[in-house]
Image (cartoon, rainbow, N blue to C red):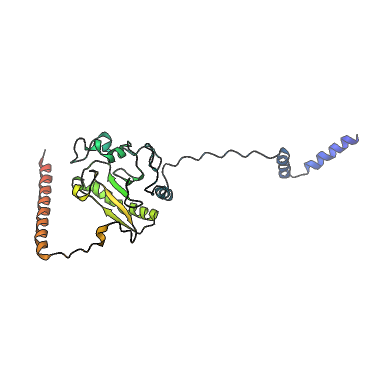
Amino acid sequence: MVGTMAIIHFNKARNRIPRKRRETQKVRDAGPTRPLPPKAASPTPEMSSPRRLAVLCSHLRPDGPPPPAEETVEGAGGVSTSTCANGVGGDGAGDGDAADCVFCRIIRGHAPAYKVYEDDVCLCILDSHPLAPGHSLILPKCHFPSLEVTPPPVVAAMCSKVPFLSNAIMKATECDSFNLVVNNGAAAGQVIFHTHFHIIPRRSGDKLWPIESFRRRSIEPNETSGLVSCIKEQLCSTTNCSKTEASSRHKEP
């Protein structure tokens, strides 16, 4: 009888405890709970700008290991395909030029490269034999062997990316200057005959160009007047030819 009375008094006292306190006591009595496994992070479709710069910095050493054949800097699949993916060049390109061009192989994803930037028209990669850390190349996705046969809209698209890309490259390499170079033709030092621009970060006193220390002579007025006239004649003839071609196209049925 005494035991029964004790149990009844215990249950009454337990019912007076607030519900929240009883729930807390149950959790304590149950012992420590196992932490839930962390949720897998969903893959992001594109790198953030700081991450892109960090990846660029990690690959700036010329003596670093080459990238894997099937990998780009961003780790995404292959480089997006373009007209060159089918071996078709742009205006002025030979039939086999695009198939043999190393830049076209990079665009098709058949050759390794450190990709820094890409859009529908052009691609920016690190030069495989840089003159300075961060030396990059901007090239069109369509094959054009020289600048003069590259359509103006393509050149404009490449030029429009120079401020954006050069600013990122200079920040990544901690430089405040750069050279924008176009080697057009064999005599100018063009090695790969696929139009491309060079962005070369510069530092004060790096002595990258020996010619910078040369003293240049002043222009000669007598020689210059004839040269200016000749250039203007060429410009006029080119403009007239363009107008004639445009008018003939409009007249065609």
Task: Name the residue nearer the viewer: 115 or 131.
Answer: 131
Residue 37 falls in which quadrant of the image? top right
Residue displayed at 9% across by 56% down = 230
**Outermost right residue:** 1
Q: Going by the image, does 165 lie left or right of 47?
A: left
Quarter of the image for the C terminus: give it.
Answer: top left
Quarter of the image for the N terminus: give it.
Answer: top right
Is there any visible trace of residue 149 in the rendered image? yes
Question: Residue 201, how many percent across, how many down?
Answer: 33, 55
Q: Going by the image, does 2 lie left or right of 218?
A: right
Q: Going by the image, does 121 lie left or right of 248?
A: right
Residue displayed at 88% across by 35% down = 3
Task: Name the residue nearer the viewer: 227 or 150.
Answer: 227
Question: Residue 248, how many percent across, how many down?
Answer: 10, 43
Number of callouts = 0
Residue 15 falls in which quadrant of the image? top right
Is there any visible trace of residue 185 in the rendered image? no
Residue displayed at 11% across by 39% down = 252
Question: Residue 193, how many percent across, how many down?
Answer: 22, 43
Question: Residue 150, how many percent across, how many down?
Answer: 21, 45
